[in-house]
Amino acid sequence: MLSRTGKLLLAAGLTVSAVALGPAATASVAASPAAAAAPAASTGHTLRPGTRFAVTPDNEAERQALTDLRQGDFTDAAAMAKLASWPEATWFTGGTPDQVRSQVRAAVRTAAAERAVPVLVAYDIPLRDCSQYSSGGAASDAAYQQWISAFAQGVGSSRAVVVVEPDALANLPSDCSATIDPTGTLTAGRIADINYAVSALEAKPQTVVYLDAGNSQWHSVGDMAHRLIQAGVGQAQGFFLNVSNYQPTDQTDHYGTWISQCLWFATDGPAWAAGHTDYCASQYYSSAAPNDGKPGDAVSPTDPSTWHWTDAWFTQNVGTPPPAQLTHFVADTSRNGRGAWTPTPGKYTGDPQVWCNPPGRGIGAEPTAATGVALVDAYLYIKTIGESDGSCTRGTAGPGDPEYGGTVDPAAGAWWPAQALTLAENAVPALTFNPRLFS
């Protein structure tokens, strides 16, 4: 039975076999066991490998595919149809408690009707994004706690994966600037808010909750582990990485595994390590390395070939923790197929904003809860593919973006058809049509 997306695309005149899939792919869909198999359910607060994630109806890519079809652009319509067929997270970025309760309830009920599990992003933390491109959030800690409580009520007893507040821990108020939180009061409130969110969501019987851990080119392993412990990760399923970023999947998995090992080391490991996430080696430094200034004898965050020094530290000091005691995580692969962007050396004298609408990027691994990596519960499209990161200027006087001919990038969160198409066309592996669209 065709899903709503499939029906709309076919009703609009898209010949899926000829345009979107191609003859060979059409045959594989017809024979695909994934298309006919019943989805595995998440059990309690864990995520099973066979979990089927929900495709958001009437998503941006679907609407773009229909627009392209009406304009006779079958090539672009096919690319957007493929993108529209894959699960992406649904973001909740504000509104009143009553509104978010209703919106979340509608999302989980729609997913349940499709026999799938939705991925929901709670994104309303006070002082969100340090009041930069994605600024906003609740007016106070009290207002946020009312909002997230209503969010949890909207989930109710339904199955849901909840991504709690991207950047909330990696970008604490104390990280914003020296003047934002001089007394630490705002940061303490932020930590309390995330703890409250974990408690509210974990009180629901079938939520799978993950907390923010930034990305592999941001905080050191020990620093991130410390923040996670403060925020209550021990009561959640785990943490998430690379949301709205571009770091390669293998490096993300490596970094996440170190964080998980560091969490165990400082909480359940040897007595001498209790509370000491600061002892953990990282992508920046390892005492196992000679650190003598010779090439390859120190850890470099941008050169994973040197990360064996950090692996050596964990082998020597952490050993092999019991698998059941290690914290799991998920990774955002929505835009990391071609890895991070490196601008031409010397092109920019200011901040090149490598995280902000970098050119030439592509979608990464398709969403799945069968990752083949022990601690990685799922690869997910968390960032909405095709939404702008903000109006980037690359440290220039602006107002335009030099990487896009000086035009002004759309505001953060705005749909950008050209970027969506670039990401789809540059996908690694190549973007295909989701066979479960037809199940």
Image (cartoon, helix red, strand yellow):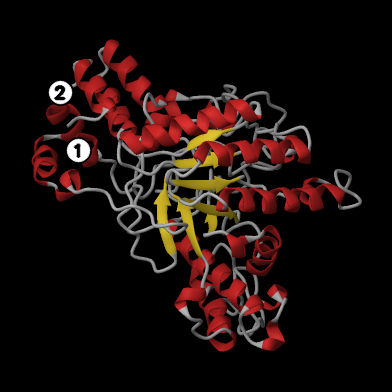
The residue that label 1 is drawn on is: 439
> Looking at the picture, how far across and down is residue 376, in whole percent?
43, 62
Q: What element carries label 1?
A: loop
Q: What residue type is labelled 1?
A: Ser
Q: Nearer the viewer, residue 438 or 141?
A: 141
User: Residue 186: which disc?
Assistant: none
Residue 148 position in % (x across, y down): 64, 40
Q: Residues within 10 Å of mark 2 (few under 14, many from 20)?
A: some
| Residue at image coords 56%, 33% | 92
Q: Nearer the viewer, residue 302 or 319?
A: 319
Q: Earlier in the sequence, mark 2 or mark 1?
A: 2
Q: Is residue 408 visible?
A: yes
Viewer-closest of 192 and 125 = 192
Identify the residue at the far right of this view: 183
Can you tell which quarter of the image residue 19 is in? Answer: top left
Left or right: where does residue 376 sit relative to residue 140?
Answer: left
Q: How many labels does the image show?
A: 2
Task: Find residue 111 and report its horizontal and vertical position in percent.
Answer: 37, 36
Query: Where is mark 2, residue-wise?
Result: 15
Residue 123 vs 163, above or below: the answer is above
Name the residue at 25% across, 24% down.
75
Quadrant that contains the N terminus: top left
| Of the pair 63 and 303, the residue shown nearer to us | 63
